[in-house]
Amino acid sequence: MKQNSFSGGKTWITLFALLFLITITSLLAAAEDQPALDKKNMDLVVRPGDDFFRYANGAWVRDLAMPADKSEYDAFDQVREQNRARLHDLFEALAAASAVKGTAAQKVGDFYAVAMEAAKIETLGVSPLLDDFTRIGKAATIEEIQDLIAGCHRENFPVLFGAGVEADLMNSKAYAYYLAQSGLGMPDRDYYTRADSDAKKLREQYLAHVTAMLELLGDSPEQAAAAARTVMAIETRLAKASKTRVEMRNIPALYNKMSLAQLQEQSPGFDWGRYLKNINRPDIGDLIVTAPAFFKEMGLMLKEVPLPQWKTYLRWQVLSAYAPYLSSAFVDENFHFFSQVMEGTKENEERWKRMTSLTSGSLDQLVGQMYVEKYFPPVCKQRMEELCVNVKKAFETRLRQLPWMSEETRRQALEKLQAMRIEVGYPDKWEDYGKLEIGRDSLLENLRRSGRFAFQKNLDQLGKPVDTSKWDMPPQIVNAGYNPVYNKMIFPAGILQPPFFFAAADDAVNYGAIGMAIGHEMSHGFDDQGRWFDKDGNMRDWWTAEDSEKFKQQTKLLVEQYGAFTTEDGVHVNGELSLGENIADYAGLTMSLAGYHLSLQGKKAPEAIDGLNGDQRFFLSFAQVWRGKIRPEALKRKIQEDVHPWGEFRVNGAPFNVAEFYKVFDIKPGDKLYRSPEQRPSIW
């Protein structure tokens, strides 16, 4: 499931000549042709204080025909589809060309070309996985099962548990090897443990899905049903030992450094020395275990669960992981459960869309460099950097004036803010893909090669100084992020286009949209997770106890506010799970509004546009970024799995904690979303 966020990058803890001139011109023209704010999208019958989401976006939402291949559709999807179309054109041209072996053009072109060979893939069926199934079938001991698990990890496929290298949370200058819970077929542990009727029904549907997939492999209905029950039993036991998503937000509790001997004692059923030899790092040193109870249970299971059942589990894990890239029968059944059942999506995306996304995701910065060269004009980078400067100045001013923060905490907060780096568009140094081999022989082989390359590149960081120039997300992605260990924000080129960023729009619109994103990401350095890291990215509690308590009391107001939002059938938003994002939305609006006002100092007040003054355009611009529709099934899933609330809740939440919003739109007691001053947090 996608994340419409502004969110951090991938981490194992939670754990980016003439033709070019023509491209710049067309991009800027498109930005100017598209109204920065269009009153036709609004529903002016709705009172802003009753439902600001529909006041700002009601007509747009009403007129939107939900695409059959989407479980949700919003402004992020609009930009993603535009970016994907651009990449598709690029990939088609590269696939048709003859490029020199080893070049970026050859690797990208060959990956996409093979991925689009639908007829060949249909003929192959499941045969690309037969060697995997043979190895699993021949495993005669639990140690050989563990060898197979390590083999999957070397292909960057986290069977049973996740593992990888990230900066040490308590020593940001060094890398460490992390172990994380994983191993489930469904995307969240609560699907296995909840006792409500929806969860019970979903478990029945998952059993039916596993059974159907195994029948496609050739198992009899009886064999497939029995194997599905085995899979469910193993995954349920793993799920019960897993931390909840809310528990995973407790950063200090994720840091459990262990020696190899301590880990072996914690998880005795797994031969960790053998595993480290299998991944060619027997000298790995201490490891950081993010979920000790999970690994304790995993070790017990490897002693107690019979070998044949582990073989069944591994067979299923391999099949499920690669199902989207096999013949249509497997693709369709995989789509049926994970998209139709879980999200309500009516149709699968066309193959070119899926394979364009796969190529971009698998080749990451190799594609990103091509995207930036063709589609990211320098003027966008320059204007974005100017916005960042003003929002950062506004944050500094507010930090200096916070009445609840002590001078000792304030001093360190200001030091952290000053040290915070902001990177826009693309990394200063591109990743080296010289060792990655891509061919035209097989889609699955290319996936395995890219997986092995990614795993080894990650593992090779051990023993080297931490490279803070590294990006955690590709430049072509429509997102943004903050990395607390690097203490830096990233705004990829992919998001720097309408409606998030307009090269030619008035400042109010840009501050309300991308400016809010800047303040949002900046505040992640000081939210309930980011506050655990100092200016150098080391995890330590630099807040006084009194300040921490004041902060917690204020954030409780946000937990209560968002916890009161519900779906049409009464499912409540999880205010604790989404707390970090809700803090960041509130802070982002506060900081970006202050930054907008700062940009106006010494200038003549801007005239109203379409009858809307600057502050009104600011808040409406924020609201239109989060416009969208979502299917009921997808909304339930988002509430359970995603730290990011659905856009409607964001738009009807954050502004109602900002005092200026009440003045701008004449929000009064009696309006449905009105919050008294005592209900509004005062954090940043």
Image (cartoon, rainbow, N blue to C red):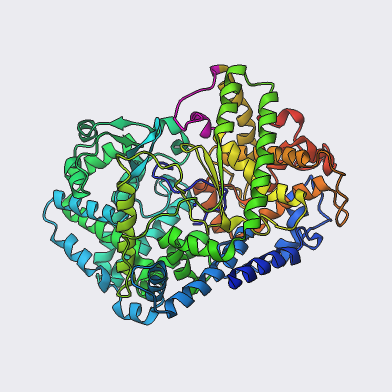
* Front in this rendered view, residue 86 or 251: 86
As for residue 530 lying within the magenta part, the answer is: yes
Say how many tags the image has. Answer: 0
Name the residue located 62 percent from the left edge and 64 percent from the top edge: 78
In the image, taking residue 174 as reference, residue 424 lies left or right, namely right
The secondary structure that most of the magenta stretch takes on is loop
Name the residue located 30 percent from the left edge and 47 percent from the top edge: 459
Q: Quadrant of the C terminus?
A: top right
Tell me if residue 432 comes above or below residue 15 in the rendering. Answer: below
Tell me if residue 29 comes above or below residue 473 in the rendering. Answer: below
* Front in this rendered view, residue 618 or 167: 167
Q: Quadrant of residue 560?
A: top right
Is any atom of residue 527 visible in this view? no
Name the residue located 29 percent from the left edge and 77 percent from the top edge: 124
Tell me if residue 210 comes above or below residue 606 in the rendering. Answer: below
Rendered location of residue 322, percent (x, y): 34, 64
Is any atom of residue 298 visible in this view? yes
In the image, taking residue 467 as reference, residue 476 lies left or right, namely right
Rendered location of residue 593, percent (x, y): 74, 40
Name the residue located 43 percent from the left edge and 79 percent from the top edge: 97
As for residue 280 lying within the magenta part, the answer is: no
In the image, taking residue 82 as reference, residue 213 lies left or right, namely left
Rendered location of residue 256, percent (x, y): 34, 31
In the image, taking residue 634 as reference, residue 56 lies left or right, namely right
* Front in this rendered view, residue 566 or 511: 511
Q: Which residues are magenta?
A: 526-545
Q: Quadrant of residue 681?
A: top right
Tell me if residue 408 comes above or below residue 394 in the rendering. Answer: above
Residue sticking out furthest to the front = 17
Q: Quadrant of residue 94?
A: bottom left
Rendered location of residue 68, percent (x, y): 57, 70
